[in-house]
Every structure is written in C-alpha cells, then in structure tokens.
Image (cartoon, rainbow, N blue to C red):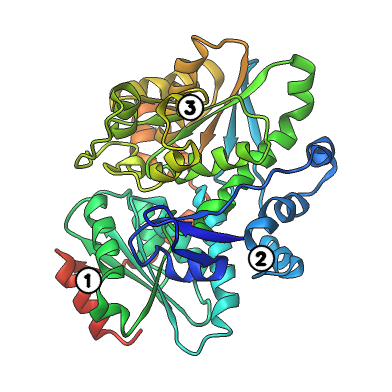
C-alpha cells in the first residue's frame, strides 16, 4: 500500500515513510492509494473473532510490505489491551465508551499504535526521531503516555495555556523522560499552525527528523477504524434481530475519528450514516449548509478537545467523497451545539438514564437525537471519547454530584507540572534548534 499527498497525488510514500514524515513535503496530508474491501465472510464471522484478529484483518492492507503480520500482531497486542464496551441508553441509543485505556481517552489507541510503529522503525535508524504534536486536550496525554520511554523517539507537545482541563494538563506535563511540554500563549489553532510551520522550516528539518502524532499522521488516524469494527461485533446480533440500521454520532474537532469511521464503512462495515457533532466551532456544519469551507479562529468551550477552527482531517473526508457535497450528504451530517445545550444534555442523560457523560459525549448524544428525529428506525451509537472525570469541574457543577476519581488520575494529580512557556513560533524554533533532545 502506498499513500499519496492530497495536495499532489503524484507525491507518494510507503506506510513507513508516511508515518515518519507525518505530512508530505508539499504540506499535504497522506491518503491511502485505495481503500480495500473486506470479504463477506469477515463480517459473517466477526462475532467469533478476537479484537487482535479483527485488528490484523483491518490494518494489514495498510501496513503490508512494511510490517509483517507477526509484527502487526505484536503492535496490536500493545494497543488493544482494554475494553471498548457499548452501554445501552435506551432501545434505540447506546454509547461506545472509548475511555478505558491508560489516559482515559479515545486517543490511546491511535497514539499507542503510532508509538509501537515508530519504536520498530527507530530500531533501524541511527538518528533519533522527534515527535512534534499540538493538542487541544486529550491528544497530549495519550501521546505522552504512548511514547514514554520509547527508545530513539523524543516527544515535544504544544498545548494552549489555560485552555485544557487541569487533569489533561497534568497528564502531559508530569511524565518527564523523553516527553517535553511547551505551554503556548494562544489557541489550539496557534499550536497546530506552529507545528505545520516547523515541518516546512529547513533550518529545523536539516538537523532533526520530525514527525507528527496528531491525527494528520496516518499511524494515528487509521487505527481509529478499529473502534467501529469492535462496536459492530458487539451490536451485530441486536441489529440483525431488530432490523435497524446502524448510525454513529461522533464528537468532532479535528475530524480524524469520524474520518477513520468513514474509511471503515468504505471497507464494507455496514453503517448507514455518520453524524459529526460539534460545539460552537462549526466550520463543517456551516459547510454542509452553504457548500463554502471557511476556517475561523477557534472559540473556547466546555468541550475543549473540539475547539478547532480549521479541522485538518476534513480534507480527507472530501477526498473520500470525490469532493462532491451531494455524495457526502448521502451518508454524512453535521450539527453544532452550544455549551448551554450541552449541559442540558448532560443533565438529561443523568436524570433520565442514570448515565454520566462528559461534555464531548453529550455533544455526540445531541447530534444523534437531531438525526433520529428524521430517521427514527435506526440504532444510534454516540461516542463517549473521554472519562467524565477529565472534565471534573463542569461535570460536577452540571450534575450536582461528586465524581469518584480513578486511582490513576489521583496519582497524576499529585505530580509536579513541568512546562516551558512560549508565545510564538520563534519560541518553538529556538527550542528545537537549541535542544539536543
């Protein structure tokens, strides 16, 4: 499998090259040269398959020629070692909990997959690889945890000061070793812009091998497909008995997670529709209404991991749909919700169904309700992408209850934060050119 730059389709790379480079030399995102279709027998037997067996079948076409099946199996064993349960809300709605990994966030799968791959690749390189990543919340902690102690790999995380939750900040600023956190006086979009600038700066790249661990990187992005296959495995008997079609509502910021789900559908996963649920950062909902893509400066919300004003992965979604809005609309919708409406949804889920959702999951729930008003004969799954405790203050205030803090978070909160404050790209460049890490 080769990957091409969406900006310049003739620019191609192997899986290994695409992972190490992060983005193509022309600043384009890499995209698979084709989406393979899984066999009918795969879906017929999926109920009897383990998570690892499903992962090998799904991911092997994308890593073939670079990772042997045994190497891929070892990677997946270090990734899919926790549960992905679906919790029933009512007869037509369930939630897929993706927060049972080490940092209590959905990004654990992609971050750990990429870390395992880079660990294998760095064994064969003499020079260290520097992973440069911007985070609006959970990416930083997941990447820090996934790459901690990986030989030959150093990690530099940029995060917006005061715009991530206290727990999220502790998760990315307390590990030490090969993890460095840069605290940026700005927004997530500012952090992401700095990362992109660094990749194009020859004064840095001539001396350091940079790669990105944001969902722009194929090794972070594609493994997120696995959530949807594992969800289908759990739901298949129920769907066959009820005759209802499956839809997913995905809280969306940089749009990597929902884009991966749509790739899974292209591979044959029987999903009727995807809903991209956003907060007031509604570039994509506006695009779906007007056909005009107009990036905007991001606005801070209580669902901070979705505070993205120019979602990188939406271009991959457009590529998948041949840049045809009419084609996209057939299987994709996008809705935007305010903080006040999000809090109302959190309270309704708790009072009506005894379910405690974080703000992102609540946005996903709202998107699902919006879609099911017109399509009631569906079974909808909204993604609960982070443990509610990661947004402790807003959840406790909204629900009027005290959350039990998991032991792994108690341990993180007791650690000392260590970060380097920067105000602009010059600060990042100075750090990267002067440091020897």
Exactly how many numbered labels are in the figure? 3
Residue 187 falls left or right of residue 365: left
| Label number found at residue 172 | none
Residue drawn at x 59%, y 69% is 116
Give whichever of 220, 337 is nearer the camera: 220
| Picture quadrant where residue 45 is located | top right
CB within 8 Å, label 3 to label 1: no
Question: Residue 413, can we see it?
Answer: no
Question: Residue 283, can we see it?
Answer: yes
Mark 3 or mark 2, earlier in chain: 2
> Crowdedness of circle 2 by 10 Å Cα count: few (<14), some, many (20+)?
many
Look at the image and tell me in which quarter the N terminus lies.
Answer: bottom right
Locate residue 346, reporting x and y percent: 42, 25
CB within 8 Å, label 3 to label 2: no
- Against 209, residue 299 (above or below) is above
Give whichever of 79, 224 is nearer the camera: 224
Whole-number angstrom distance, CA of label 3 to CA of label 2: 35 Å
Locate residue 156, reporting x and y percent: 35, 70
Residue carrying label 1: 428
Q: Secondary structure at mark 1?
A: helix
Residue 262 falls left or right of residue 348: right
Mark 3 or mark 1, earlier in chain: 3
| Label number found at residue 327 | 3
Residue drawn at x 28%, y 23% is 290
Residue 386 falls left or right of residue 96: left
Q: Secondary structure at mark 3?
A: helix
Locate residue 181, reporting x and y percent: 32, 68
- Against 150, residue 162 (above or below) is above
Whole-number angstrom distance, CA of label 2 to CA of label 1: 32 Å
Residue 264 falls left or right of residue 325: right
Residue carrying label 2: 75
């Amino acid at each position: 499998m080769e990957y091409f730059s969406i900006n310049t389709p003739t620019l191609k790379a192997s899986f290994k090259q695409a992972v190490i480079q992060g983005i193509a030399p022309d600043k384009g995102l890499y995209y698979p040269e084709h989406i393979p279709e899984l066999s009918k027998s795969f879906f017929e037997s999926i109920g009897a398959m383990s998570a690892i067996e499903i992962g090998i079948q799904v991911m092997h076409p994308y890593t073939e020629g670079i990772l042997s099946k045994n190497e891929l199996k070892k990677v997946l064993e270090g990734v899919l070692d926790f549960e992905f349960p679906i919790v029933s809300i009512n007869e037509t709605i369930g939630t897929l909990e993706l927060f049972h990994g080490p940092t209590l966030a959905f990004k654990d799968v992609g971050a750990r997959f990429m870390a395992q791959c880079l660990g294998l690749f760095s064994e064969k390189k003499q020079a260290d690889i520097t992973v440069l990543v911007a985070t609006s919340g959970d990416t930083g902690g997941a990447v820090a945890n996934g790459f901690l102690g990986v030989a030959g790999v150093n990690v530099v995380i940029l995060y917006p000061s005061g715009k991530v939750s206290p727990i999220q900040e502790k998760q990315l600023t307390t590990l030490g070793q090969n993890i460095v956190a840069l605290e940026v006086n700005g927004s997530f979009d500012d952090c992401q812009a700095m990362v992109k600038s660094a990749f194009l700066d020859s004064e840095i790249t001539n001396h350091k091998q940079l790669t990105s661990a944001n969902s722009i990187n194929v090794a972070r992005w594609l493994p997120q497909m696995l959530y949807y296959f594992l969800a289908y495995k759990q739901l298949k008997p129920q769907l066959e008995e009820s005759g209802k079609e499956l839809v997913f509502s995905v809280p969306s910021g940089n749009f990597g997670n929902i884009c991966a789900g749509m790739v899974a559908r292209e591979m044959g996963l029987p999903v009727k529709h995807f809903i991209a649920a956003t907060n007031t950062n509604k570039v994509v909902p506006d695009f779906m209404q007007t056909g005009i893509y107009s990036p905007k400066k991001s606005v801070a919300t209580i669902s901070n991991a979705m505070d993205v004003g120019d979602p990188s992965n939406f271009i991959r979604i457009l590529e998948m749909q041949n840049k045809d809005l009419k084609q996209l609309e057939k299987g994709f919708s996008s809705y935007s919700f305010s903080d006040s409406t999000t809090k109302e949804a959190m309270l309704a889920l708790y009072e009506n169904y005894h379910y405690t959702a974080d703000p992102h999951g609540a946005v996903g729930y709202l998107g699902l309700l919006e879609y099911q008003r017109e399509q009631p004969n569906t079974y909808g799954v909204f993604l609960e992408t982070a443990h509610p405790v990661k947004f402790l203050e807003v959840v406790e205030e909204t629900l009027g209850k005290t959350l039990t803090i998991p032991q792994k978070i108690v341990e993180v909160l007791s650690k000392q934060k260590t970060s380097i404050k920067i105000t602009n790209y010059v600060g990042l460049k100075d750090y990267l050119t002067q440091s020897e890490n």
